[in-house]
Amino acid sequence: MKTFRYERPTDPAAAIALVAGDSGARYLGGGTNLVDLMKLGVETPELLVDVSRLPFGEVEETGGGGLRIGAAVRNSRLATHMLVRERYPALSQALLSGASAQLRNAATIGGNLLQRTRCLYFQDVSKPCNKRRPGSGCPAREGVHRDLAVLGASEHCIATSTSDLAVALAALDATVHLAGPAGTRSLPLTDLHRLPGDAPERDTVLRHGELITAVELPPPPRSARSAYRKVRDRASYAFALASVAAVLNVRDGAVHEVRLAFGGLAAKPWRANGAEEALQGRPATEDSFAAAVRTELTACRPLRDNGYKVALAERLAVAVLAQLAELD
Amino acid sequence: MGTTTAVTMEINAESCALDLDNRTTLLDALREHLGLTGTKKGCDHGQCGACTVLVDGLRMNSCLLLAVALDGAQVTTVEGLSSDAVLHPVQQAFIDHDAFQCGYCTPGQICSAVGAITEAASGWPSAATAQERPVGSVALTEAEIRERMSGNLCRCGAYVNIVSAVAEAAEAAREAGR
Ligand SMILES: Cc1cc2nc3c(=O)[nH]c(=O)nc-3n(C[C@H](O)[C@H](O)[C@H](O)COP(=O)(O)OP(=O)(O)OC[C@H]3O[C@@H](n4cnc5c(N)ncnc54)[C@H](O)[C@@H]3O)c2cc1C
Ligand code: SF4
Ligand code: FES
Ligand code: FES
């Protein structure tokens, strides 16, 4: 690992100034992804600015009945928070399905959202990779890509984002609050991560020096239920092959309100707007769920070894929606 | 501004002041600087749990924590679990249940089990917990233990006995807390 300087300012403005003024500076949350990547030589920061003790460690109710989650809140604290368990079960379930108890105790919400892809070539500095070294090529396309994207990929990169948290937040209509050298701004969570296009080195729309300060959830839709389900190679402690977060409200046997997001399929949490529109007002049956999800997944472009994800995602989404509609 | 930092931590109830290269992980600080070699290095990448210790009472992978970031923290390693000659109930349960073979994963398993028992007693759910209304504490069934201990791999495959050791220690802790 390369040597680096370490700073732990107590004031957010000082943290932002330190990172904004130094292209080799990075924020440090729990370090469970960044330190790993530094050991691998993928990240080589000259300065780490520790933001894990900034005053962003609270989960608070907002005036409107929603929830404001500080970026430094640890994953396990949020997953086990009473209000989250009662009002946003999909969020608690997504967090609890991620990593291990040890990692969840250390990982922060901000760091979780900005964790980098687990593509094997990205993590191996002896290999080409457009995301790590722009223009060097993408060996995953012809090589090992069983875990990689079937939606929204480009010829330059087929990496997936791996945050379970982000998938639940996408379905829950979360907003991300940012602070940077030019002031503050807020984005829908679904606009935070970007598809690779011809710039796969940029995972998100964040500018250098921008800090995630909080994530905000609107109040849960009345009488809607939510759930998160994840399929992986082993029962626990593995990244998603595919995952689904859904919010569903059924009235008189018809879909009154639905929100659906997929994980493990693309470089960002995939909010299934097409399926949601197709389901609006339709009977809450497995047949209409399957038809709507299939419409969404026609956009899939599987490669040699990841085609199984399309059928898996369809069945998973139908199962989660059926569970929320209490069809079985 | 240099690349070393003065760090003070309370390790196994003793205050330790160290001058550390910023790159030093908590795991390396324990093993290389403090001679606390009970905590093991398996993968060094957060994938095996051999390096598990308790930081401010919560179990974490010491291989991914930078020691500089832990200034002021309280750390408990496997060496700090027993008092005088009396083993911690989880340590004793591992012996009674023959819950290891080579023993390499064991310190991490034990620290992780101590954390898991506290978490369940505080009512923290896991992915194996039914999603009904939150309860005061979660009973550690076999399914719960397997899920909650999934961050600790055992190359020797001593899992069956690890599960029964953790179940017994959890039950004893429940009895004692009653
Ligand atoms: C073995 C293993 C298995 C895992 N399995 C899963 C899994 O199944 N599901 C899953 O979702 N995750 C999984 N993870 C990833 C884990 O969730 C992340 O490592 C963790 O959430 C990152 O949080 P952190 O606080 O440690 O981030 P850090 O490592 O500190 O930071 C990550 C990135 O975010 C930046 N950053 C941190 N905080 C902020 C902020 N407030 N504002 C702006 N930038 C910031 C950092 O500069 C860095 O680039 C796994 C990790 C490991 C090692
Ligand atoms: S898929 Fe993306 S991250 Fe993986 S090798 Fe290709 S360019 Fe790199
Ligand atoms: S050595 Fe830390 S998890 Fe393997
Ligand atoms: S006892 Fe040998 S690795 Fe677990």
Image (cartoon, helix red, strand yellow):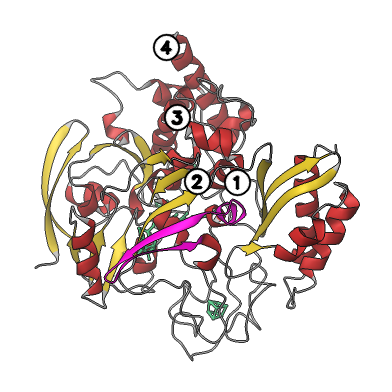
Instruction: Find residue B8 and report its image quarter.
Output: top left
Quarter holding the N terminus of chain A is: bottom left
- Mark 3 surroundings within 10 Å by alpha-carbon count, few (fewer than 14), some (14 through 19), many (20 or more): many
- Mark 4 surroundings within 10 Å by alpha-carbon count, few (fewer than 14), some (14 through 19), many (20 or more): few
Asked whether the residues under the numbered discs 4 and 1 touch, taking CB atoms below 8 Å apart as contact, a structural biologist would say no
* Of B87 and A43, the residue lying toward us: A43
Q: Which residue is mark 1?
A: A236
Residue B177 image label: 4
- Residue A143 placed where, x, y %? 64, 80
For the point 55% across and 43% down, the residue is A219
- Which residue type carries mark 2? Ser
**Chain under callout 3:** B
- Residue B6 placed where, x, y %? 10, 53
Asked whether the residues under the numbered discs 2 and 3 touch, taking CB atoms below 8 Å apart as contact, a structural biologist would say no
Up the image or down, A67 lies above or below B170; here it is below
- Mark 2 surroundings within 10 Å by alpha-carbon count, few (fewer than 14), some (14 through 19), many (20 or more): many
- Which residue type carries mark 1? Ser
> Disc 2 or 1, which lies upstream in sequence?
2
For the point 70% across and 63% down, the residue is A273
Q: Are marks 2 and 3 on the same chain?
A: no
Residue B119 image label: 3
Up the image or down, A31 lies above or below A59; here it is below
Determine whether the residue tagged by mark 4 lies in a helix, strand or loop: helix
* Of B93 and B1, the residue lying toward us: B1
- Which residue type carries mark 3? Glu
